[in-house]
Image (cartoon, rainbow, N blue to C red):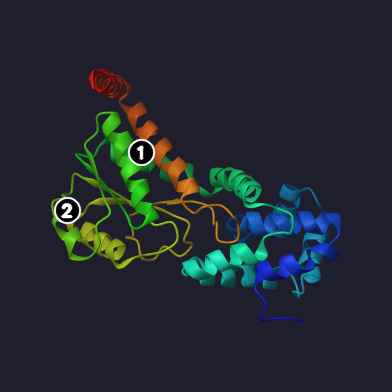
Amino acid sequence: MVTSESFSTRVTRLAGALTPNQLKAARYFRQNATMTLTSSTSLIASKVGVSTASVIRTAQSLGYAGFPELKQALADELSDTGTEPRKLIGRRVSARQAGRNSLMSVIEDSITTLEEATTTIDRTVWDEAVGALAGASETFTYGVEEAGHLAEIFAHHMRTFGFKAQANRHTGRSLAPFVTSLGADDCIVLFAPLRVFPEIKEIFAYAKDRSIRTILVTEIVDTSFANDDSLVLATPSTVLTDTENIMAPLVVAYSLAHDVANRSSSSSMDAYNEMVERRERL
């Protein structure tokens, strides 16, 4: 039995030997990694439309002793690949199914990821996040690299509806002046899809010292780096799929701003209409 082979490589290598039901289960494992790690065999069977025995046999056909061992292999690959962009790209290139082009892979996996997001994001936490943002004096949004674009998009939508918001993607010492201007009446939204940069940890530390509410948007399973009272909006894992890791967070950013606006719909619409009028003059 091969033990050093990664989960995704093994699925690609053995896909041709799986039965139709086993192939359905294997695809579910790959495209819904987060749910697979937290679900029972019976729940997965109901999601896929196969028997519980088929789920177990799929794990065994992939060379694992059972479903727990498959979960461990999946968790190991998520942990390893999720922190190394080079490995992530390499896996996506090597594991792509023959005859499946990039466009269709990205579209299909993105649809699956967004569907899974309806189950990974806790509705109660979402409502708390909306309330925290609606009541904040100012919102500070932050992200590094591509996550910085998410921060800018979210801040843009918040400003569109009349809320005071600023986005930042500075790193190192240049970040300090922006963070230290925040107070207890403000709210911080951090976008960290896959990686926890030192700046993210420093912002959490500052927020804890100043009792500033923080909201974290991430697909990282272990969020112990966040503050105890942080509101975590958990997005699905993308590291075993062809989905861009900012896809679900982008939808979160857009939807979150709109739900905040709905909390004060009258003033938000006034601000939006004023923005439209001024834009038309330009």
At 37% from the left and 64% from the top, the residue drawn is 196
- 113 and 129: which is toward the camera: 113
Q: Which residue is mark 1?
A: 130
Quarter placement of the C terminus: top left
Image mark count: 2
At 34% from the left and 41% from the top, the residue drawn is 154
Disc 1 packing (10 Å; few <14; some 14–19; many ≥20): many
Amino acid type at mark 1 = Val
Left or right, 98 with respect to 139, comes to right
- x then y, percent, for residue 20: 84, 55
Marks 1 and 2, Cα distance to the nearest angstrom? 23 Å
At 18% from the left and 65% from the top, the residue drawn is 173
Quick check: can you spot residue 124?
no
Residue 178: assigned label: 2
Quarter placement of the N terminus: bottom right
- x then y, percent, for residue 42: 74, 55
- x then y, percent, for residue 45: 75, 53
- x then y, percent, for residue 100: 71, 53
Which picture quadrant has residue 195? bottom left
Closer mark to the observer between disc 1 and disc 2: 2
